[in-house]
Image: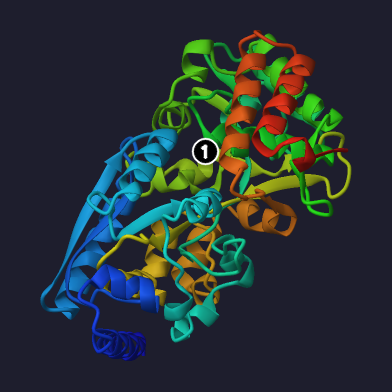
Amino acid sequence: MQRKIFLLAAAAAVAATTLTGCGGSSSPGKAAAQSGQGGGTTGTIKIAYQRFGENRIMDNFLAGVKTEYEAANPGSKVELDPIVASENDYYTKLALMLKSSKTSPDLVYEDTFLINSDIKAGYLKPLDSYLSSWDQWSQFEESAKGAAKGQDGKTYGVPDGTDTRALWYSKDILKKAGIPVPWQPKTWDDVLTAARAVKAKVPGVTPFNIYSSKAAGEASTMQGFEMLLYGTGGTLYDDASKKWVVGSPHFVDSLKFVKTVFDEKLGPDAQDATDAQLSDKIQQQWLPNGKLAIALDGSWITGSWLPTGGKPWPQWSEALGQTPMPTQKGQAPGRISLSGGWTWAISAKSDHADAAWKFIQAAQTEKNAAKYAVAASQIAVRKDVAADASYTAANSKAPVFSEVVAVTKYRPAYPEYPQISNQIQVAMESVMTGQSSPEDAAKAYDESVKGIVGDDGTTTQ
């Protein structure tokens, strides 16, 4: 059935290309700009994505799709271009590549929080003309579709999964610290109490990690700060007034939590906390080797421990427990999570947009989408994948991350968000290192936000 669907979609794309060619444009890129499609369905397409640390999940997945795609499309070639970089460096390098038609890839792996800023910069191509005739689009959850939609109402990416965040903990370390397992903290104080017990009773172990540095980039903002802020009842952006919030006591409370963690030496030391490779260390070394008790982190980290991951660890599901991050004082709904995700997007400068779209279709068949969701420990965004036996079996080992979907929040991914996220990281690191008090760091953040969006773009809460 999937084969039939793929062939029908491919035939539709070929027909569209033929019509475009009849328009008389001598430039594929010009044709693409005029029609919303273009470039033909053959030739070589270049695909850019992030490679970080020992993780080769995406490399292996794309290599498999490339083989299928090239076999099904004689004359077509795929050039995989992994960008070896941490998150922040990846975003920077990708933006530089997308600026010029000489360096721009055809297809890019795009974090959803960058969608609107890259749309505003003119880097991405709207996909609506393709999606309107793709019968698989109806399988995608509406919330996931929204994550790839621009402020102009057009869709610029096809999501391949989402994620949630919660607390991972070592059952063995918490037992040694006298903490009952399964552990179910109800407040922030419960989290700190457990970390203090680990520090007191289990030497040689980092009690708790919350990303708080500029080097950790968006991980600090999303896995760290926003998991705190939205657990206080606060928010970064006021949807009613469509303005960014400043002067928030919730913002200060969140920074006070960070200060407590690092003042009491419950977190990593300064060298590790500011290391851009910290997430790699946690996944590849600290958790598998019993050197970290509690980690506020994402649903995807199990991907490293699968047989196909960078650090196979068959015992992970017995060794680690998971529990939701509680709200500040246990206030309703009692737990909190954040969701993000990545999408496949086509460069506005691509001369092979039709071929790039065909590759997206090949990568996002039910079979391939399920394969990637399992390998990368993603939360499925396709309804048929969510019901797939291989997916549900893999997901059952860490059920908390699916349960918190009910309370998850999404980032206000407007064009200004990347700059504002950067200022959050500045505030966190200044508190983490003792350079600023939470109150002073919050004031500096407020001034930075006003500088980014203007006084008229802010409101108080």
Image coords of residue 298 (percent x, y): 55, 43
Kindly tell me whether residue 327 is visible in this rendering: no
Which amino acid type corresponds to the residue marked 1 in the rendered image?
Answer: Ala
Image coords of residue 265 (percent x, y): 64, 11
Image coords of residue 223 (percent x, y): 60, 38
Please say which color scheme the image uses: rainbow
User: What residue is shown at x 41% (from left), y 55% (from top)?
Assistant: 123
Q: How many labels does the image show?
A: 1
Image coords of residue 14 (percent x, y): 26, 87
Q: Is residue 53 left or right of residue 443?
A: left
Task: Classify 307 as above or below 202.
Answer: below
User: What residue is shown at x 42% (from left), y 41% (from top)?
Assistant: 91
Q: In this view, does 392 lie to the left or right of 82?
A: right
Task: Classify 210 as above or below 145.
Answer: above
Q: Is residue 267 left or right of residue 24?
A: right
- Residue linked to disc 1: 319
Residue 179's quadrant in the figure? Answer: top right
Q: In this view, does 120 lie to the left or right of 183?
A: left
Which of the two residues, 253 or 286, is positioned nearer the viewer here? Answer: 253
Which of the two residues, 384 or 392, is positioned nearer the viewer here? Answer: 384
User: What residue is shown at x 74% (from left), y 46% (from top)?
Assistant: 336
What secondary structure is found at the residue carrying circle 1? helix
Q: Quadrant of the C terminus?
A: top right
